Amino acid sequence: MLKPAVNNTEKTLHENDFIVSKTDMSGKIIYGNKYFIKISGYDESELLGKPHSILRHPDMPKVIFKLLWERIKNKQEIFAYVKNLCKDGSYYWVFANVTATTDANGNIRDFHSVRRKPSKEATKVIPSLYTTLLAEEHAKGIEASSELLKKILHDKGVSYDTFILSLQQ
């Protein structure tokens, strides 16, 4: 399936909107709530079994997903701001919480994500940060982008989690 042509039309979540999805171990969508399907613009049949990256907006630095996968594969939750791409080329920002779902033996069964509207503060700060990380990634690769993110956080004197959560308050 080809990625849609990106446009500058933004869809905005309301305060009480929640997007929920589950992916299998390889990142293929196995569940999406009605709002997830609606805002994405895809039919449920077009999403199920597809990689969640079908929604990846080209403005998103890969380093954010690298961090996300490192965390959830180690059964650690992560919060992140994500710009998603809709079927019609529009986009929407979310504040995502992603966790691993485990079975009775503690083995990862799948991954669960709940997303909601990001704060106004986050929508002011995150786009420029991601532009900076993406430029570094394009120029020098994902590892350089990762090192830049670590430097930015170090210079702010905060951990990734503290920084991300502070923007949502």
Image (spheres, rainbow, N blue to C red):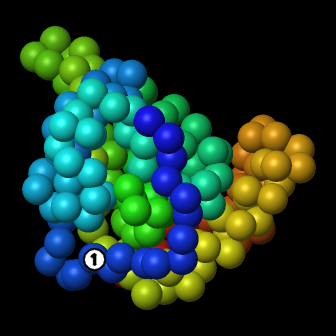
Q: Is residue 82 visible?
A: no
Q: Which of the pair 98/19 is nearer the observer? A: 19
Quarter location, residue 124: bottom right
Q: Is residue 46 left or right of residue 72?
A: left
Q: Is residue 14 left or right of residue 128?
A: left
Kind of residue sitting beneath label 1 = Leu
Give percent across and percent down for residue 163.
54, 68
Q: Is residue 90 visible?
A: yes
Q: Is residue 41 left or right of residue 158?
A: left
Q: Which of the pair 52/157 is nearer the observer? A: 52
Instruction: Please give the name of the residue rendered at 19% of the width and 61% of the height, measured from the top-left corner.
Output: 38
Residue ranking furthest to the right? 139
Q: Which residue is mark 1?
A: 13
Looking at the image, is 135 positioned above or below residue 15?
A: above
Instruction: Please give the name of the residue rendered at 55% of the width and 63% of the height, measured from the top-left corner.
Output: 6
Q: How many marks?
A: 1
Quarter location, residue 15: bottom left
Give percent across and percent down for residue 17.
17, 72
SS of the residue at dot 1? Answer: loop
Looking at the image, is 108 positioned above or below residue 27?
A: above
The C terminus - image quarter: bottom left
Instruction: Please give the name of the residue rendered at 39% of the width and 32% of the height, measured from the top-left corner.
Output: 51
Give percent across and percent down for residue 101.
21, 30
Give percent across and percent down for residue 79.
40, 56
Q: Is residue 166 left or right of residue 66?
A: left
Instruction: Please give the name of the residue rendered at 83% of the width and 54% of the height, measured from the top-left corner.
Output: 136
Looking at the image, is 38 positioned above or below residue 139?
A: below
Dot 1 crowding, Cα within 10 Å, few <14, some 14–19, many 20+? some
The N terminus - image quarter: top left
